[in-house]
Image: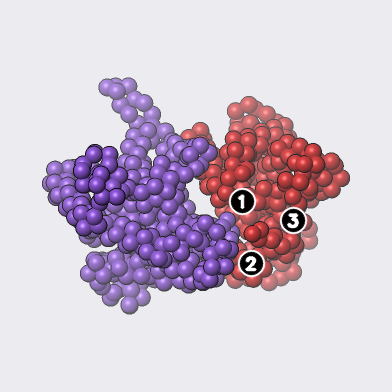
Chain colours: A purple, B red
Amino acid sequence: MHAKTKAILNLLTVAVLGLFLWWADDNLDGYQIQILNLIAVNIILALSLNLIYGFTGLFSLGHAGFMAVGAYVCSVLILAPEQKEMLFILEPAFGWVREAQAPFFVAVVAGGLAAALFAVVVGIPLLRLGDDYLGMATLGFAEIIRVLAINAPRITNGALGFKGIPDHANLYWNFGCCVFTLYVVIRLVASNSGNVFKAIRDDETAAKAMGIDVFRQKLLSFTIGSFFAGVGGALLASLLATIDPKMFTFVLTFNVLMIVVTGGLGSITGSVLAGIVITILLEWLRIVENPIYFGDWELQGIPGMRMVVFSLALICIILFRREGFMGKREFNWDWVARRFGNKAGRHAS
Amino acid sequence: MTWAMFVQHTLNGLTLGSLYALIAIGYTMVYGILRLINFAHSEIFMLGAYFVFWGITLFYLPWALAMVAAVIVTASVGILVDRVAYRPLRDAPRISALISAIGVSFFLQNVTIVVFGALPRRVYRPAWLEDPILMGDVRVLPLTLFVPALSLLLMLGLVWIVYKTKTGLGMRAISKDIETSYIMGVPVNRIISITFGIGSALAAASGIMWALRYPQLQPVMGSIPGFKAFIAAVFGGIGSIPGAVIGGVMLGVIEIMAVAFFPDLAGYRDAFAFVLLIVILLLKPTGLMGEKLEDKV
């Protein structure tokens, strides 16, 4: 299939997605729209972790920390000064925190950039560490961010966090960012940089021997991934309208890791599909945690059951299908063409 | 700060430190043998505490019996976790086993929430543990003396097992070279099971004493102590048992002293250990007592 045809098909897919969102915005109820929004954000987060861990082999458990940075920066920028005046009841905000203002788009990008800056600062010392140590150190970083957020009430309003964050993050913003992330990650992975990342993942020593500046490339991947983690965190803050330090615990990282592992480490398609399926399941399984009524008869909800199911699922996937649903395979128009037997697909190779 | 207060803080630090040390031993033994960070270890610690109070309130067991039973049951859980979630992944990339361990950690934590509920529960201590002991100006709870003493006893027992028994010889052999140990006829899987059992038993003992010292039970109570104990193990040099003990005790004393001398920093207490972890990993990744692990090409 020609590259041009593929480009047209890709554009068509985006157009169909746009039409679907336009339809969904009018016809679905608030809860369903919220799930769609969460799907978009989770796909962004999964793609960013997949870039860091799936494609470059850096086992980072710091996602919640980068998301927190993005979320706080974005919230501070989009909350109105009067709102901030009301919110900061523990201690008054610093002047520059109170006055900081930016349009939503700028705020989201600023959230991403702040996360990327943190990634550079922690990446330079930490990325020298090997796999499991890197995981523990980045997890430590995420916890430090959380403790800092609690102990800096003049910037973050301490343990209370922010409420009433303007809900700019609608379907179009979220899916717009999602498609943009998808585009960047696909192009990056297909580029020479992408090949270098995969080389480092598969054999760091060999990559070094081939003359690759391993540390620099790792830092590049880590920073870009963290940028998108920050963007995801920023969107999440505006979507949920409320953030506090308790939100950014290890559970958040666990959810993203689960999506990436389920979809397949090193598969963009896998992250997208798993992002959709797992977000829906996560919401759907809330049912088991709430009481169910059959007429007068009440079946009690079981708190904690949702994470029992998910942690069990993660263990089973790691034990029985380590490569995830997709392995390293990707969605491909050629495959679609062959499958549905159209002539264009068969003639071009 | 008066002399009496200094002694009191030191004793508190030793108590906290020996609790960390008991958990850290489990991390370090498993890491020494399998190169696996047993993420679920902090949940094993938590289960130990829950089992005791379950035994007392549900089966009306006397204290001593409940403790022994809880330690045994927790050790079995540790062995079971290894059997089900880690053993099938022995030949897989190391990170796979770590992800499995993270899954197990969340699983155990949430099963506890399902069974016992998420709300914190109060622990009723026996009366003789409540009255402070007076030594001159120093006022300490009996636990503050009892915990380090019992911990020391348990550690001496461990040293005996590791250095004087055939099982211990097997452990040391496996940690040097697992494949050669297979060839030499060491029953590798059985010894790994025993290692998990011992590590979990010590974590359970620590969990029980922790619950007596800070009388509250919570399904998430293991996360922070578990993580700090891991840091203590890295601090002491992961893979080394004396290192884990020294690291644990030092971390406990430093933590208590830091808060005692700089009360303004109390809010950062939990961040301190993580900063320490990052600093050690950067400056001396082998820790105080650890041996250098070579990168195999």
Q: Residue at x 23, y 39 (%)?
A: A341
Mark 1: which secondary structure? loop
Residue nearest the viewer, comparing A235 with B178: B178
Mark 1 is on which residue type? Ile
Question: Where does label 3 land, which residue?
Answer: B240
Question: Where does label 2 land, which residue?
Answer: B280
Image quadrant of residue B100? top right
Image quadrant of residue A305? top left
Question: Where does label 1 land, which residue?
Answer: B37
Query: Are discs 3 and 2 less than 8 Å apart at CB?
Result: no
Q: Is residue B187 above or below residue B245?
A: above
Residue nearest the viewer, comparing B161 with B182: B182
Q: Is residue A265 above or below residue B86?
A: below
Rendered location of residue A120, percent (x, y) = 46, 71
- Does the rendering let one see residue A226? no
- Does the rendering let one see residue B164? yes
Q: Earlier in the sequence, mark 1 or mark 3?
A: 1
Mark 2: which secondary structure? helix
Q: Earlier in the sequence, mark 3 or mark 2?
A: 3
Mark 3 is on which residue type? Ser
Rendered location of residue A16, percent (x, y) = 17, 49
Determine the CA span between mark 2 and mark 1.
17 Å
Q: Earlier in the sequence, mark 2 or mark 1?
A: 1
- Left of B121 or right of it: where is B12? right
Q: Which chain is home to disc 3?
A: B
